[in-house]
Amino acid sequence: MTGTPAHDASTSARALPKVTVTLDVEDLRPDHSLPERVVEMTNRVLDLFGEHEVRASVYVVGELAERRPELVLRAAAEGHEIGLHSWSHVPIPTRTPQTFSEECRRGRALLQDLSGQEVSGYRAPMMSLVPAAAWAVPLIAEAGFTYSSSVLPGPSPLFGWPGLPRQPFRWLNGPIEFPCPLVRMPGIDLPYLGGTYLRLLPSFVRRHGLRRAGTDEALWAYCHPWEFDPDEAFHPHQHIGMLASRVAWLRRSRMERQVRRMLGDPLTGPLGVVAAELSSEGTDLPVIDPKKPASAGRVARWADGRLRDR
Ligand SMILES: [Zn+2]
């Protein structure tokens, strides 16, 4: 190979920090009389991970795991970490503390039975661990989870918790939290490694975000089986509103290509491994009291929750 290092793709790729790949396995059909596509699409994504020899964190909705245990069995057999993506994929603030706690325990026990793994990771639906659901933090730890990746640490038109650190931190009396990575773009912080952004934005935005990431950030990307499915008919997703549902439906035919590009960049192992390393190294993480959220700020007050009811 000739050419200057500046134009050598492999050299520039090596300069990027490593990213954990995660998959949120959920069945968002509003009506179960519609065709079920989650098994086929999850298998397609797991094929893609296998092709690229990726070890991912796979968070599965409890009631889906109960109905389609083969999804958990396959992901676990192929070496992926299994975590819980709530019991029924509704935002945490819509639950009572008691129901939330019971569902966390039930979901974790089921996934442990199916996978044969110690299940240590919890991921809230739609990053819905927000100040109004601060009561959930100790319950996540009491259910046996040692880490969570459930917050968007900035203002969000859906669910966000502005003012939280961008690097991993420990909740007071709770689990380690891996906040969703954000990049500052003019006027807005974007969760640039999230499925919608992988689908809709050019790859240079992802690379721009990765190059600007702090060295103390834990970088993770997330995607969903339905994002790889251009053939599914449009239907509104409950809890995110009509506009966000439209966005979720856009440009799905592009998703596989975009994710393949990402899988060619430097990757690291599942978040459960990162959490265990942080604990065993005794790393001093910031400690955050969920009952004392940082100031939201003007932008956050304007943006917070704007799209949920559209
Ligand atoms: Zn989800």
Image (cartoon, rainbow, N blue to C red):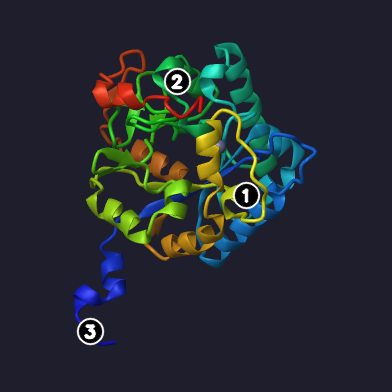
The spot of residue 20 in percent (x, y) is 42, 50
The spot of residue 136 in percent (x, y) is 48, 18
The spot of residue 281 in percent (x, y) is 31, 40
Depth check, mark 1 against mark 3: the one in front is 3
Residue marked by disc 3? 3
Depth check, mark 2 against mark 1: the one in front is 2
Q: Earlier in the sequence, mark 2 or mark 3?
A: 3
Q: How crowded is mark 1: few (under 14 residues within 10 Å), some or many (20 or more)?
A: some
Tell me which residue sits at (31%, 66%) in the image: 13
Residue occupying the far bottom of the picture: 2
Is the C-beta separation of discs 2 and 1 under 8 Å?
Answer: no
Which image quadrant is residue 3 in?
A: bottom left
Residue marked by disc 2? 137
Q: What secondary structure is found at the residue carrying circle 3?
A: loop
Which image quadrant is residue 166 in?
A: top left
Say what amino acid the circle numbered 1 marks.
Ala
Task: State whether residue 269 appears in this view.
Answer: no
